[in-house]
Structure formats: C-alpha cells, structure tokens
Image (cartoon, rainbow, N blue to C red):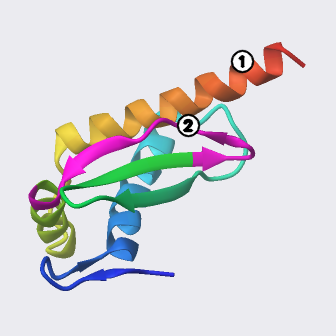
C-alpha cells in the first residue's frame, strides 16, 4: 500500500516508480544476471527514506536518501526530465549488490 507524505507532497509509490525507472535504464544498458525484476522496497524514519531491492529471497542493504533529496528527485521525475546521475549510480550499486548476493547463493548451492 502506498503511503502519502503530505508534508512533502509525495508518495512511497512515486519513489518506487522513480527507482524502477532507473532500474529499467540499467537493464537496457547492462542487463541483470538474475531472473525477474527487483521488488523496490521503500522504508523511512523521521529524516530519511531507505531504498532496498529484493529478488527471490535476497534483499540488499538499505540506501539512505534525505527527505529533501527525494523530494527534489521526484520533482525532476514528474517533469519527465533526465534523471540524476548520482541517484542512478546509487540504484545501480544496489542492483550490483543484489547480483552479488544471488551469485554467492548459486555458488553455495
């Protein structure tokens, strides 16, 4: 279920969509070594959002983003402007982390 953050004017669903857009770009350019598309997990505390990716039974460590950082990124996303390269790099690192987790599990099977 999506959570709306009225003080920011954004929803957790929009954050997930922005992350998914970055993942789609990464998929087009680099492909993934795992099957299926990662689930985007958005969590938060009083100051930050935390993005994690999950495929099968493997979940990445959380990547933190401040509320203001996400709000600014979503403004760009909604305007259909090119996404922020540093944000993309962080999401790409999560995808690489996920590939590593799955690769280790295959090696141990």
Q: State the residue at coordinates (38%, 80%).
A: 3
Q: Element type at marker 2?
A: loop
Q: Which mark is residue 31?
A: 2
| Residue 27 point in image, percent of width and height | 50, 44
> Which quadrant holds residue 17?
bottom left
Q: Which residue is mark 1?
A: 104
| Magenta segment | 54-68
Left or right: 50 with respect to 28?
Answer: left
Does the segment drawn in magenta span residue 102? no
Q: Residue at x 21, y 67 (%)?
A: 77
Q: Residues within 10 Å of mark 2 (few under 14, many from 20)?
A: few
Question: Which residue is at the far front?
Answer: 46
Residue at the right extreme of this rendering: 109
Secondary structure beneath label 1: helix
Closer to the camera: disc 1 or disc 2?
1
The image quarter containing residue 107 is top right
Across and down, in percent, residue 14 comes to 33, 73
**The one of 26 and 19 positioned closer to us in this rendering:** 19
Instruction: Classify mark 1: residues with Cα within 10 Å, few (<14), some (14-19) or many (20+).
Output: few
Q: Position of residue 12 (x, y in %)?
A: 36, 72
Structural distance between the alpha carbons of marks 1 and 2:
18 Å
């Amino acid at each position: 279920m999506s959570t709306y953050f009225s003080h920011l004017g954004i929803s957790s669903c929009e954050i997930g969509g922005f992350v998914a857009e970055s993942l789609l770009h990464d998929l087009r350019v680099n492909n993934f070594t795992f099957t299926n598309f990662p689930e985007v997990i958005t969590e938060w505390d009083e100051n930050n959002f935390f993005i994690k990716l999950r495929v099968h039974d493997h979940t990445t460590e959380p990547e933190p983003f401040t509320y203001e950082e996400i709000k600014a990124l979503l403004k760009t996303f909604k305007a259909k402007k090119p996404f922020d390269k540093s944000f993309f790099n962080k999401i790409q690192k999560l995808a690489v982390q996920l590939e590593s987790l799955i690769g280790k599990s295959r090696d141990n099977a």
